């Protein structure tokens, strides 16, 4: 199964580079994903990684993108408490203001979302269908 895997510093500029690297990989001859799929994967990945930067004190973000037939699995892990991540059912709930739009998009784009971990490590795994 084609896999993209890396660890990046938990900084916004690294997240931006990551999005471009993953989109380029998704468009490569190895994968050949259509633009909507590559864009959706990039958006999900960016939102999940940006939340690590914005809402934790993690220093590093581990990323894995795996193409499995007609599905793409995106996993974002960090050394931050899984218990601090809101329940997926609450992602994108309106709380007034400008927050939560990214998580609403993640919920809309992903067929399944799982949050795993403990008080020192968390992984958010999302499965997208290929367009």
Image (cartoon, rainbow, N blue to C red):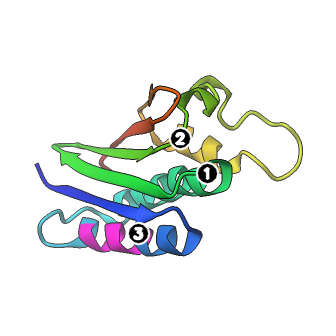
Image: magenta residue range:
19-25
- Image position of 67 with respect to 5: above or below: above
Crowding near the residue tagged with mark 2, few <14, some 14–19, many ≥20 C-alpha atoms within 10 Å: many
Overall secondary structure of the magenta section: helix
Task: Check if residue 111 falls in the magenta segment.
Answer: no
- Image position of 58 with respect to 81: above or below: below
- Image position of 16 with respect to 90: above or below: below
Q: Nearer the viewer, residue 20 or 119?
A: 119
CA gap, disc 2 to disc 3?
A: 20 Å
Crowding near the residue tagged with mark 3, few <14, some 14–19, many ≥20 C-alpha atoms within 10 Å: many
**Residue under numbered circle 2:** 80
- Image position of 36 with respect to 104: above or below: below
Q: Nearer the viewer, residue 43 or 122?
A: 122
The image shows residue 29 at horizontal and vertical percentages of 13, 72
Choose top left, top right, bottom left or bottom right for residue 117.
Answer: top left
Q: Nearer the viewer, residue 46 or 43?
A: 46
Of the two numbered discs 2 and 1 on the same chain, state the one appearing first in sequence.
1
Q: Residue at x 60, y 57 (%)?
A: 53
**Residue under numbered circle 1:** 57
Assess whether mark 1 and mark 2 are in contact (beta carbons under 8 angstroms).
Answer: yes
CA gap, disc 2 to disc 1?
A: 7 Å
**Residue under numbered circle 3:** 18
- Apparent side of residue 118 relative to residue 29 in the rendered image (left or right): right
- The mark closer to the camera, 1 or 3, is 1
Choose top left, top right, bottom left or bottom right for residue 17.
Answer: bottom left
């Amino acid at each position: 199964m084609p896999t993209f895997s890396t660890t990046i510093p938990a900084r916004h500029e690294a997240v931006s580079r990551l999005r471009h690297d993953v989109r380029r990989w998704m468009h490569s001859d190895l994968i050949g994903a259509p633009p909507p799929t590559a864009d959706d994967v990039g958006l999900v990945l960016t939102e999940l990684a940006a939340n690590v930067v914005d809402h934790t004190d993690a220093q590093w973000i581990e990323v894995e993108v795996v193409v499995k037939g007609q599905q793409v699995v995106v996993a974002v892990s960090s050394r931050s408490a899984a218990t601090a991540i809101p329940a997926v059912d609450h992602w994108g709930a309106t709380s007034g203001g400008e927050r939560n739009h990214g998580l609403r998009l993640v919920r809309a784009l992903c067929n399944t979302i799982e949050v795993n971990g403990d008080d020192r490590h968390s992984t958010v795994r999302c499965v997208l269908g290929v367009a």
